[in-house]
Structure formats: structure tokens, C-alpha cells
Amino acid sequence: RPESTKYLTEEERKIAVDRMNRSGSGDTGAVVNKSHIKAAFLDWRIYLGGVIYFGANCALASISAFLPTIIKTFGYTNAIAQLLTVPPYACAAVMLTLFAYSSDRLQSRGFFMAASSSIAGIGYILLLTVLQNVHVKYFAVFCICGGTYTTIGIAIAWFAHNLGSETKKATGIPMFMGAP
């Protein structure tokens, strides 16, 4: 918490707390406000966010579990298929970093989340419809990994930031992560 951090000056602490509370109610984390807990349970955005997060996690779990098998169907051996799983994940890390930085800089997470979801969707469509071209199918795997990991990263930041008070965040984040 900024108010108890030793490496910030008093003025820097005040600025940090003001920034944290500019979209919230001003509670500092030591306060549990029962009306904010109730507001979290009544906020439809938390449930919608949970459905989005659940869908992205289903896509992530499927690609994580089956990526070596998918790549093996391209005609590679087990060892090569395992090795070829590394570049899509590296690409996903770069894509997540770039999208997260850009969405934070532009204060527009929804656009970047929609874009990354679309990239993943295009990847799944390519993987399902292209039958012969191994290079296109491998490109599709890059799209799926990059889009899916990026969607989840941005979703967590977006929903947490939009909840408001510390109490509502503490209630709402576990709700949206386990909503469906």
C-alpha cells in the first residue's frame, strides 16, 4: 500500500493514494464498507466480466493442454512438436506486453481486449478451416496463443480497475474470476 511504503516521500504517497482513489470511493483498504460489498453482488458488470473471463479461460486451457498434439498433427515428431510450442508462447508474451502497455497508455482496454479476442478467433477459424498448409496452421497457433493470453491479461486489469472502491474490488475480483 502506498500510504505505508518506506521508499516514497510523503508527497509521493499522497499522489499515489490520490491516483488509486480517483475512480473509487476513497476508502483506503483498512475499511470494509458493507454497502460496497452489496454493490459488488448487485453489479451486472462483474457477472458479464466473469462470463468473458470464463470463455477466455476455456480457450486458454484448450490451447495449453492440446498445443503439442495440435502441432504433432502438422507432421512433426513428438520432440519437435514440443519444441515448436515455445515460439507461440514467446509471441504471446510479447503481444501481451505490447497490448497491455498500449491499452494503459491510451486508457482504452476494451478496444485492445476486443482486438486480441478477434485475433484468437481468427486463429481458431484458420486452424479449423485450413487443411493442407502447415505454415498457415502454425501461424494460426501463434494467433490463438497471443490473442488468448492477451485477452485474459487485459480482462483482469480492466475489470479490476473499473470496480471502484477497495472493498468492492476485494469482493468483485473473486466473483468475476469464479462467476460462471
Image: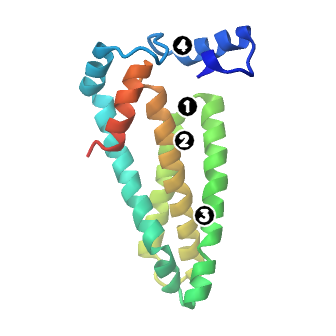
The residue wearing badge 1 is 108
Contact check, label 4 and label 3, Cβ < 8 Å: no
Identify residue for label 2. 112
Between 36 and 120, the one nearer to me in the picture? 36
Q: CA distance from mark 2 to mark 3?
A: 19 Å
Tag 4 secondary structure: loop
* Callout 2 touching callout 1 (CB < 8 Å): yes
How far from the left and from the top, in percent, is residue 54?
Answer: 34, 50
* Visible residue check, residue 90: yes
Which residue type carries mark 1?
A: Ser
Location of residue 7 (image quadrant): top right
Residue 66 x %, y %: 44, 74
Q: CA distance from mark 1 to mark 4?
A: 17 Å
Residue drawn at x 65%, y 62% is: 90
Question: CA gap, disc 1 to disc 3?
Answer: 25 Å
Q: Which residue is mark 4?
A: 22
In the displayed structure, 16 sits above or below 172; it is: above
Badge number at residue 55 = none
Residue 89's mark? Answer: 3
The type of residue carrying mark 2 is Phe
What is the C-alpha distance between the residues marked 4 and 3? 36 Å
